[in-house]
C-alpha cells in the first residue's frame, strides 16, 4: 500500500462559515472529513496539521516550518501533498524547491478557490487530483488544481480568473 | 392550486462566497435556484426580489418598502413568505404586524444562519418549513425556522445559540 | 421541549443502493442519519424501527404491528410520524384511522418517491415538512408530502405523476 | 488547450433511479451534467454517447463499435476516456489494447460502483481522476478508479470488495 503525507496549512480550502460572525475563517480542520468522501483503498494517508492560516498571513517562520515538516517526511520517501492558500502557494513552493535537494518523490501543493463544502467548491476536486497525481508524477514540486499540473516555477495565480495560469 | 408569494430581501440565506474577495456577500439571488430542489406540485410560487441586504443595513425606508410590497400582494389574498436576515427579522415582523390590519392569511418571515448551499446550511430546511406552514397556519405574522413557529411578538434571536427562542 | 415519535417501516425513502447486486433494497436504516442534517433545537425526537419493507410486501400482521406501536406511543400523547412506502401508505393510514379512537395528536404518514441521498430525492423535504406539521396540525391521520397535507381519506397515489393527489 | 474525448457507454456510473419502476436503469445521460461540477479551464472536453448499457449486456458488436469510435478519435491524437460498466471493463480494455497499435496517447477506462449523484458515489471521483490522468499518463490502455492506475492487463474486478485489484 502506497503511503502519502498530507500537510495542512489552512487557506481557503479549509475555511468555515461562522454563524456568530457571519464571516469565513480558518477555524477548524476540514481535510480529513472530506477525504472520507473519496475512496482510497490502496493508499495509506497520513494527515498532519501544521497551521491553519490564510496564506497572506504566513510568515517566513511559517514557511520554514513547512520546509522542516516536508524534510522530516522525506526521510522515508513518500509523496507529500500540501494544502495551502492560493495567494502565496507559489512562494511557498519555490522555497520548498530551493530547500529540497535530490527529490525522489513528488511534492504537490493544492488548495481551493471556494472552501470545501460550499456550493461550487473546487476543494474536493483538487484534493482528488492531487492524490491521483502522487501516483503518477515524477520527483519535483508542483501545483495541481483544476485539472492542471504546473511545475512550481511555471505557475502564477490569476486572481481575476480565480485560477492558476502558465508563467 | 394554492398561490404563495415569496418576497426576497437578502440576509444570510442568500449570501454567496466571492472568490475575488474571499468574503460572503449579498450579491446574487439564490432562492429560486434552491426552490427547484423542492417538489411543490400544487403550489403556484411567485418570487419577487425587493432588495438584497444584510438585515443590519436595512433602513426604515427599506422596511416601508417591505410593508408596501406585502400590502400589494394581500389585495388578492395569498400567503406571503419573506426571506430576511435574522438580525432584524423581528423588527421587520413587528412593523408588518402593526401596519397590516385584518389579515386573512399567514405572513411568514424566514431566513438562515448559514447561507443556502454552504455545508450545514439551514436555508432549505427553513424555506421548506415556511412553505408548508403557509398551508396550515392561520392569519398572523410569524417567524418559521428550525422546526419552530413563533408568533412575531414571541420571537427573540439568541445570537450565541444561533437561533430564535421564545420571548 | 416538544416530543415526537418517528416510526420507521421502510419504503423507498430508506432504500439503499447495493454495490454487490446493483439494485436498491431496504437493507439499512437511514432516517436517523438524515435527520442530523435538520436543525431541531426544540424537538425531542424518538426514532423507532418497526420493520424495513417495501410497502407492497407489508402484510396484515405488519399493519397490526404498526397500529400497536402507535397505540403504545399515544399513552403519553405526542405526535407520531410514520415513514412508509407510498404504494400502500393510504391503506395503512386508513387502518390507523379506524383503529385509533379519540386522537389528541396528529399521526402523519410520509415517505419518498426517490430514496434519501439519491439525486433529486424528496425524502428530506418530506421529513422536514412532516416534523413541522406535527407542530401545527390538529388531531387526525394525514399524509404529508410535497408541500401537501392530506387527511388520510382524501389521499390517493398517482403512480404516473409520482405523487399523491386529492381523492 | 488540451483536448480530451469522453466516450460514454453506460454502466453503473450513469444509472438513474426510476420513480415509476423503483429500480436503477441506464435511461439517461449523466456524464455531462456532472462534469459541470468540475473546473476544467484548460481542457477541451468532447463528450460522445455510444450506447447506454449495463456492461453485462454489451455484445461483441458493441465492443467493435467502441473500438471504431476510439480509432476515429485517434486520427487527431488526443487522450480518450471511456465510461463503462465495471463488470466487463477489463474485457473491453483488452480488446482495445489488442486492436490499437502504436498508441501515442492514453486510453482510460473508468466507471463507478455507485451511480453518479447517489450518496457515497465514487463516480465524480473516478471522472476527476481519469481526466487528471490524461494529463500525465503515457500511451497505453488503463483502468483509473479509486486513486489507482492499472495497465489494462494488470486489472481484475473484485466483486466482493467492489473495486479493482492487481492481477
Image: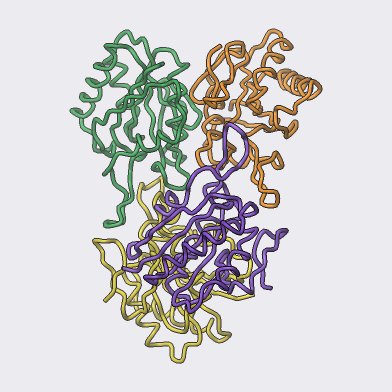
Chain colours: A purple, B orange, C green, D yellow
Q: Quadrant of residue C95?
A: top left
Q: Is residue A152 above or below residue D16?
A: below
Q: Is D103 situated left or right of B22 in this image?
A: left
Image quadrant where one finds the C terminus of chain C: top left
User: At which x and y percent is residue A107?
Assistant: 49, 69
Q: Going 37% across and 18% down the picture, which residue do you hit?
A: C3
Residue D38 visible in image:
yes
User: At which x and y percent is residue C1?
Assistant: 41, 16
Q: Going 48% across and 32% down the picture, which residue do you hit?
A: C146
User: At which x and y percent is residue D77?
Assistant: 55, 84
Q: Is residue C72 above or below residue C128?
A: above
Query: From this viewpoint, which residue is outermost toward the bottom?
Result: D102
Q: Is residue D164 above or below residue D78?
A: above
Query: From this viewpoint, which residue is outermost toward the left?
Result: C61
Q: Quadrant of residue B158?
A: top right
User: At which x and y percent is residue A18?
Assistant: 57, 37
Relative depth, front residue between D100 and D26: D100
Relative depth, front residue between B24 and C159: B24
Q: Going 39% across and 78% down the picture, which residue do you hit?
A: D63
Relative depth, front residue between A111 and D79: A111
Amino acid at each position: 500500500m502506497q503511503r502519502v503525507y498530507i500537510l495542512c496549512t489552512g487557506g481557503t480550502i479549509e475555511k468555515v462559515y461562522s454563524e456568530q460572525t457571519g464571516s469565513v475563517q480558518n477555524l477548524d480542520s476540514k481535510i480529513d472529513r472530506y477525504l472520507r468522501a473519496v475512496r482510497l483503498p490502496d493508499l495509506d494517508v497520513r494527515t498532519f496539521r501544521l497551521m491553519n492560516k490564510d496564506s497572506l498571513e504566513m510568515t517566513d517562520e511559517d514557511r520554514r516550518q513547512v520546509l522542516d515538516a516536508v524534510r522530516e517526511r522525506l526521510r522515508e520517501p513518500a509523496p507529500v501533498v500540501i494544502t495551502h492558500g492560493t495567494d502565496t502557494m507559489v512562494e511557498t513552493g519555490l522555497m520548498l524547491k530551493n530547500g529540497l535537494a535530490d527529490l525522489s518523490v513528488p511534492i504537490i501543493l493544492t488548495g481551493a478557490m471556494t472552501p470545501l463544502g460550499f456550493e461550487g467548491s473546487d476543494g474536493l476536486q483538487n484534493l482528488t487530483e492531487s492524490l491521483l497525481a502522487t501516483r503518477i508524477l515524477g520527483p519535483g514540486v508542483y501545483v495541481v488544481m483544476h485539472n492542471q499540473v504546473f511545475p512550481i516555477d511555471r505557475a502564477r495565480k490569476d486572481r481575476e480568473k480565480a485560477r492558476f495560469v502558465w508563467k
